[in-house]
Image (cartoon, rainbow, N blue to C red):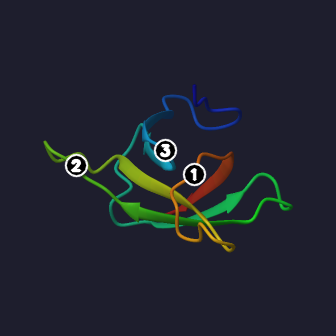
Amino acid sequence: TPAVARGTAGTTVTRTAAGDYHVLFAQDVNACSYQVTGADPAANRTFAAVSDPGSPANNKQVRVVIKRAGGANEGELVDGDFQIAVHC
C-alpha cells in the first residue's frame, strides 16, 4: 500500500496499477513542474511525473510512472518507492 512518508498536509498517493501512481495534493499543481526520483539509487528504474487531471478534471493530481530501465524486461511497469518535488 503506497503511503506518504514526508509531505505537505493533505497529500495522498494511490497505486492504480503496477508502476502507476496518482499523487493528490491539497492545492492546484497543474501549472507547476515536477521532479521525481527513486528512493533506492541501486534500483534499475526510470521515473516520470506528468500532470494528470484524470476524469473528472482534477488539477491537484500528478501521475507518476515507474519502469524497469534495462535488461530483458526494459520498459516494464514496476512498483517502487519514489520521491516527488513540485515546484510552483
Q: Secondary structure at mark 3?
A: loop
What residue is shown with label 1? 78
- Distance, label 1 to label 3, CA atoms, is 5 Å
Hey, what amino acid is under mark 1? Val
Say which of 72 and 48 sits in front. 72
* Residue that appears at 74% across and 65% down: 44
Above or below — where is 43 with respect to 60? below
Dot in front, 3 or 2: 3
Left or right: residue 27 compared with residue 19: left
Percent of width and height locating residue 5: 70, 32
Percent of width and height locating residue 52: 31, 56
Label 3 near label 1: C-beta < 8 Å? yes
Hey, what amino acid is under mark 2? Gly
Q: Earlier in the sequence, mark 3 or mark 2?
A: 3
Percent of width and height locating residue 46: 62, 68
What residue is shown with label 2? 54
Above or below — where is 88 with respect to 9? below
- Distance, label 2 to label 1, CA atoms, is 21 Å
Q: Earlier in the sequence, mark 1 or mark 3?
A: 3
What residue is shown with label 3? 18
Left or right: residue 22 compared with residue 86: left
The crowding category of the residue bearing disc 1, from other C-alpha atoms within 10 Å (few below 14, some 14 to 19, many at least 20), is: some
* Residue that appears at 55% across and 29% down: 9
Residue at far right of view? 42
Q: Secondary structure at mark 1?
A: loop
Q: Secondary structure at mark 2?
A: loop
Label 1 near label 2: C-beta < 8 Å? no
